[in-house]
Amino acid sequence: MPTIEIRRAVYEANDERAGRIRAGLSSRGIFTVNILGSPGAGKTSVISRLAALVAASPRPRPVAVIEGDVASDIDTRALRALGIEAWQIETGGDCHLNAAMIEGILGRMTLADKSWLFIENIGNLVCPAEFVIGEDLKLVVASAAEGSDKPYKYPTAFARSAACVLTKTDIAEAVGFDEDFFRAGWEAVSPGAPLFPVNGRTGEGAAELLSWLEEVAAARPEA
C-alpha cells in the first residue's frame, strides 16, 4: 500500500504562506522576530525589555507584538499595560502558531512601515521549531531554572534559532545550573551563533541583544 506524505504537504502549504507573509512585511521594512521558549522561560519579559529600549533609542521605531497562547490573554494585557501594542492569538489547544494564524491576525493589525514585530510563540521547545511563520529569524529563550540540558534535549529549536537568550542567571547557583555545559550544547547545535544572558527583571544584557538585532535588521537585503 503506498504511503501518502501528508506531513510534507501540510508543511509545504504553510511554508508557501509564510513566504508570502515575509515578502509582504519585508517590502515595508518590517523586521519580524519569532520567539521560541518553554513556559516561564521569560519570553514576555525579554520582549518588554526590548520594546522599552527601542522606544528610548536614538532611532526609535514602532514595536508591535503578537502573543500566542493555548488559552488566556494574560501576557497580552501585561504588555498593553506597559503601552506596547499587543495582539492575541489563542490556539485553543494547538501547540504552535502557524502561518495561517499569523496571516489572519495581520489582517486586523495596522503595522507602521519600518516597525519591529515580535511574535511570542506557544510555550514549548518542540512544535514551534518546525514551522516558519513569516519571520526574519527565530530567537530561542531559555532560563537557568529549566536546567542546563535544553540544547541537548531539544536540538531543533536551538539549531534553527539565530541566537539564544539565557535568562534567570541570577538564580543559576541556587538551581544548580551549569552554564558551561549549556554553552557547549548551544555551540554544538548552532556553531558561532551568539548567546545573550539577559535579566528580565533588571534589564541587564538587553542592550547587547538589541544591538545585535539592529545589526541583523540593517543587514537584510530589503533594508
Image: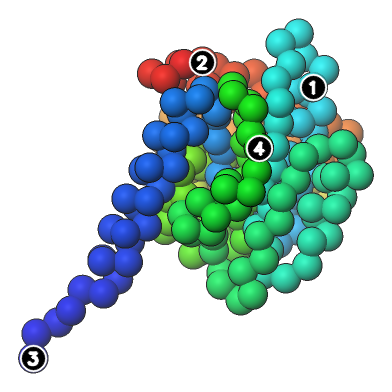
Please identify the quadrant where the N terminus is shown: bottom left
On the rendered structure, is 113 left or right of 44? left
| Residue receiving disc 1 | 55
Mark 4 or 2: in front is: 4
How packed mark 2 is, by other alpha carbons closer than 10 Å (few <14, some 14-19, many 20 or more), is: few
Q: How is the image coloured?
A: rainbow
Which sits earlier in the primary sequence, circle 1 or circle 3? 3
Q: Give the labeled residue for mark 2.
A: 218
- Give residue 184's mark: none
Q: Which residue is mark 4?
A: 110
Q: Earlier in the sequence, mark 4 or mark 1?
A: 1
Q: Residue at x 67, y 66 (%)?
A: 90
The residue tagged 3 is: 1
Q: Could you say where residue 145 lies in the image, as x and y percent from the top left?
A: 75, 56
Furthest-right residue in this view: 81
- Which of discs 3 and 4 lies nearer the camera? The answer is 4
Q: Residues within 10 Å of mark 3 (few under 14, many from 20)?
A: few
Nearest to the observer: residue 191 or residue 119: 119
Q: Amino acid at mark 2?
A: Ala
Query: Spatial distance from mark 4 to mark 1, Cα to Cα?
Result: 18 Å
The residue shown at (83%, 45%) is 79
Calculate the distance from the C-alpha at mark 1 to the C-alpha at mark 3.
59 Å
Q: Nearer the viewer, mark 1 or mark 3?
A: 1
Marks 3/2: CA–CA distance: 52 Å
